[in-house]
Image (spheres, rainbow, N blue to C red):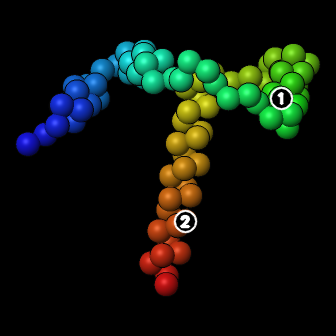
Amino acid sequence: MASTAEKIAAEALKLSTDDKLVLIHLLMESITPPELPELTPAHKAELERRIKRHEADPSRAIPFEQAMEEIHEELERRRRTREGRANAS
């Protein structure tokens, strides 16, 4: 028997991409702790570097959908590489 979460997930998968993103946001907001940990100096410096880079050339920015597609492609490429290594062993 499917759990409540599995039933909800099955319905959520039928949603449009925009509705899925809204749902993700709502779920993340519901579990985000009230106090986030402090960023390390290294993280702060990296964020500042990225902000400055963007401000210097905003034309380099890409749409969220494109970024997610590139991330998924890279993850899939890495998964295939790992599987290839495992099968070669």
Rendering coords of residue 5 (x, y %) = 24, 32
Amino acid type for the residue under numbered disc 2: Thr
Q: Which mark is residue 44?
A: 1
Is the Cβ of the residue at disc 1 closer than 8 Å to that at disc 2? no
| Image position of 35 (left or right of 89) | right
Label 2 secondary element: helix
Q: CA distance from mark 1 to mark 2?
A: 33 Å
The image quadrant of residue 7 is: top left
* Disc 2 target residue: 81
- Residue under the point 59% across and 48% down: 74
Q: Position of residue 22 (x, y in %)?
A: 43, 15
User: Residue 64: horizontal and vertical position, in percent?
Assistant: 59, 23
Residue 23 visible in the displayed image: yes
Residue 18 visible within the image: no
Instruction: Using the image, tell me which numbered label, if any, was put on residue 17.
Output: none
Which badge, 1 or 2, is on the more N-terminal residue? 1
**Secondary structure of residue under mark 1:** helix
